[in-house]
Amino acid sequence: MSIAIGRTGVVRLVQRGPCTLSGGAPRPPIHVVAGVLRDASGRVLLTQRTAGRDLAGLWEFPGGKCEPGEAPDAALARELREELGIEAKVGESLIQVPQQYADKRLLLDVRWIERFEGTPRGCEGQALEWALPEALARFAVPPADRPVVAALVEPPLCLVTPDPGADGTQWLERFERAMERGVRRVVLRTTTPDSAWAALATEAAARCRAFGADVRISGDVELARAIGIGLHLRAAQVRASAQRPVSHDVALSASCHDADELRGAERLGCDFALLGSVKPTASHPGHPGLGWARFAQLRETASLPIYAIGGVAPDDLVAARAHGAQGIAAIRALWPSGSAHSDLG
Ligand SMILES: Nc1nc2c([nH]c(=O)n2[C@@H]2O[C@H](COP(=O)(O)OP(=O)(O)OP(=O)(O)O)[C@@H](O)[C@H]2O)c(=O)[nH]1
Ligand SMILES: [Mg+2]
């Protein structure tokens, strides 16, 4: 595996095989803790890796390796003292990203910094930049940091729509209610694509625009073009696509089940993937689900943001983030029931 800087400034992994010891056992990950420091105007601190170190020149969240026996909170407070000259109160976890590099496996454990004393400065000669979250995408970052940046700025929930059935009006009402309850990313999907679906999807896309939500259509390049929204590829389409099916100014994402498909999604320049099924689901009887440990292993091989899908609900968000997921994607768990008072929960 080698590392290449892509068009978007994100550094991408070029995978040539699993990162293993000569005997074939995976190397244990290096536990790296990093902190998200914010200033009064909500800007986030990035620091630039200095010349002569791995990933030199790239921008990262300040932090470093846990020493043997050292607790992660203490390690992060020590790193921030050494690197920035501040005393920091380490807070909750943002995301834990397992990531394979050419020469090592990493667990990038990112914590919010609740508060700090002192003014951060580059004690090791590193450059510092405070950037608004929406500007973070402009920085060239290591592969493990791409899911971290996404966790800071992109929606944690992704609704995949259920079939509209016979009552399109009711479907649209429920769709709007999902938006009202905070869904800000949608994959419009049906198993019965027809002209009624095209009309409904057009309506749903207009609702998304009104709510400022990101929206893509599953599987149908022509319909995506006609409505003027992003495209979401089915896993079989990822496998069948030699090149990106839409131009770079059209948002592209994909559904994946394994490492090959994740690599395919990354190769096509998808900005996120859905990976599952994580848990057993009623729609796939007899399929045990990947489980969180396998989800994290697959997450390691790619650097794009990945939502967990399949039997998961908003209750699973903490587990999802602890296994490197951007969040959870769901049909049922994000689709409001008939009662106007029931919650997404
Ligand atoms: N601190 C930090 N390290 C990161 C990030 N992303 C990422 O891939 N890494 C990788 O994590 C590894 C450990 O980080 P580090 O080099 O800061 O470790 P350290 O502060 O203990 O420094 P040292 O080993 O040079 O003494 C490096 O390989 C680095 O490239 C990030 O956002 N922050
Ligand atoms: Mg460091």
Image (cartoon, rainbow, N blue to C red):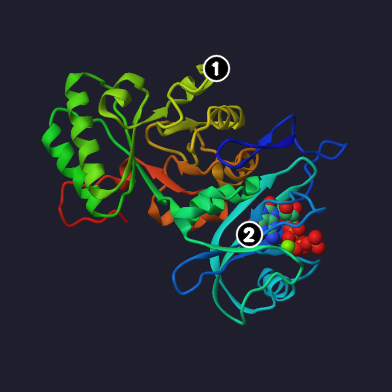
Q: Tell me which amino acid carries mark 2.
A: Asp
Q: Position of residue 27 (x, y in %)?
A: 79, 46
Relative side of 179 to 82, left or right: left
Given the image, on which type of amino acid does mark 1 rest? Ala
Which residue ends up furthest to the right in the rendered image?
A: 22
Q: Quickly name the residue at label 2.
A: 109
Ligand 1 image-quadrant field = bottom right
Q: Does residue 182 appear left or right of residue 44 in this picture?
A: left
Secondary structure of residue under mark 2: strand
As rendered, which of 26 and 75 lies closer to the eye? 75
Residue in front for this viewpoint, 237 or 318: 237
Residue 3 position (above or below residue 197):
below
Left/right of residue 170 with respect to residue 77 in the rendered view: left
Q: Total marks drawn? A: 2
**The quadrant where residue 79 appears:** bottom right
Q: Residue at 51% across / 38% down in the picture?
A: 289
Q: Are marks 1 and 2 in contact (CB under 8 Å)?
A: no
- Quadrant for residue 219, please give it: top left
Q: Say above or below: 25 vs 248.
A: below
Q: Name the residue that disc number 1 marks.
A: 242
Check residue 90 in the rendering and tell me which mark sits there, or answer none.
Answer: none
Q: Earlier in the sequence, mark 1 or mark 2?
A: 2
Answer few, some or many: residues within 10 Å of disc 2's Cα (few below 14, many 20 plus, some between 14 and 19).
many
Kindly indicate the quadrant of the structure image that contains residue 258: top right
Residue at 21% of width from left, 42% of height from top? 207
Quarter of the figure that contains the N terminus: top right
Q: Is residue 268 above or below residue 107?
A: above
